Image: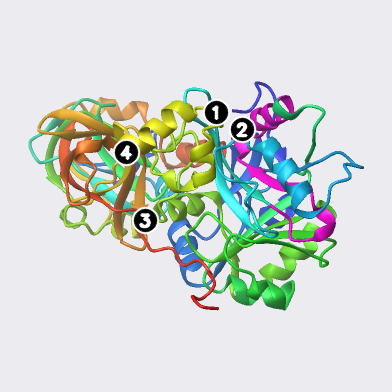
Amino acid sequence: MAEVGSSPKKLPLDAIWRARTSKFGDFAGYDMPLQFEGLIPEHNWTRTHAGLFDVSHMGPSFFALPKGHGLEGDEAHKKVASLIERLVPADIQGLKPGQVRYTMITNEGGGVLDDLMIARPAEPGAAGDLYIVVNAGCKHQDWALIEEATKGEADLVRADDRCLLALQGPNAHVAAAAVIDPALAEMNFMTVKRYDAFGRITVTRSGYTGEDGYEILVRAENATDLANALLAHAEVKPIGLGARDSLRLEAGLCLYGHDLDPKTSPIEADLAWTIQKRRREAKDFPGAKRILREYELGAAKKRVGVRPNDRAPAREGVEIMKDGKTIGVVTSGGFSPVLNGPISMGYVEAAHSEPGHVVDLMIRGVPRSATIVPLPFVPHKYHRPKKGA
Amino acid sequence: MTKRYTKDHEWVELNGDIATVGISTYAAEQLGDVVYAELPDAGKSFKQGDDMAVVESAKTASDVYAPISGEVVEANGEIKNENWQIINDAPQAGGWFVKLKVANKSELDGLMDEAAYADYVKGL
């Protein structure tokens, strides 16, 4: 929420987006483009070509051992990783150079304070550094938590004065290779690399759409050139935050504050895969007691996909019922352009979470039939190394 | 055959004692592609300002209020048959929502005419 009386901040690329749309909205204190051509055409373009998203409201940052730490390579990495592991349940020490991992900041109660990406830079000169990207609405809280937990042992450098651009879609690699560097096409999903192009950029092969693609951190003074070069490519169109939400929902990805919150555990959220074995055995992260109990025994509720059996969208807050009894709630819902129908995500009691289970959605006081389905709604198309390669 | 408009972007056009009701071109543009709409059945009565229908785009769900009190005599069959595109294509013509049998025509006096609505939208 923006501070009272303050107007939202302009993006460094504001003029580029303003020339293409007037539909803006305040997200986490930033004036963000919501829509260009229209939600559905933008969504479909991203699924079939490449969409360019400005996500500079997010919280990119570098977390590094103090200068002169005297450690090298894996040793430096293990040290910095052990510091951030005080806050997250993922195995960060185990990251290979150039590897990115999705994780969450958990609280003592086992709930989620934010979900984030942590990357180990590929470059030997960056040993002892981590690249961390947190959510826009949580960044001030997250950075304060990280600084408090690691005071004097590492330095957090915020990079949210730079631009973060996401290029997403099956032809993102074509545009990225043509505009930035042919090597981008060779990167694997969930890896990071720096390139000497448009100043010096940090690129991860990752995203929030279920498509192949990249997230690119670029200095504000170089961002206009990069955005214009990408937009000049025939495969690329600008996409607003509206389509970003329908894309991530089809991909079954959580939106913090809606599908994840301080009371919901990673196990309930069906994110057990983000907690690697070493951390499960060490039991040394915030909320480990509850999270590991649920890991072993199962949680009382579970995040699921819900497919309404008619055309009415079931949006956030809609109750999920079985035989007249409330068994859960929708946390995200809307319209899927790919399936040409409504889709929702929500939490239901474990006993009702099996795909195929038929439930009712209470929409404007009327129960409507729906079916529990596996996530994602639309298959992911990430660029992973071929087996045996 | 002139239309009157509400601040919530419904339009109403009176022919004898039958009022045709829909959403304005401005409202349809703001919504974007309609992906769902729910209309009341014939026989239902509404007071001016009551929730009468729902229209949903990919972006959001919006309530449509009765711009005038009356009883539904017909709901648009095109919309009932899930041809929601007609709301985007012709919101102030073929994309009408319902026809109401009007009880009190003087309720129209409080609504905006074409020029006043155009000014109102400009200020949004």
**Local SS, label 1:** loop
Q: Which mark is residue A87?
A: 2
Region of the chain picked out in magenta, as a range: A120-148
Instruction: Based on the picture, tell me whether residue A142 belongs to the magenta stretch.
Output: yes
Amino acid type, residue under disc 1 in the picture: Pro
Q: Is the same chain shared between marks 3 and 1?
A: yes
Q: Is residue A330 visible?
A: no
Q: Is residue B41 left or right of residue A388?
A: left
Q: Which residue is mark 1?
A: A286
For residue A177, the mark is none
Q: Which mark is residue A376?
A: 3
> Considering the image in quadrants, where does the N terminus of chain A appear?
top right
On residue A302, the disc is: 4
Please tell me how crowded label 1 is: few (under 14), some (14-19), or many (20+) other residues with Cα within 10 Å. Answer: many
Q: Are marks 1 and 2 in contact (CB under 8 Å)?
A: yes
Q: Pointer 3 and pointer 1: residues touching (CB < 8 Å)?
A: no
Secondary structure category for the residue under label 4: strand
Q: In the rendered view of the protein, which quadrant contains the C terminus of chain A?
A: bottom right
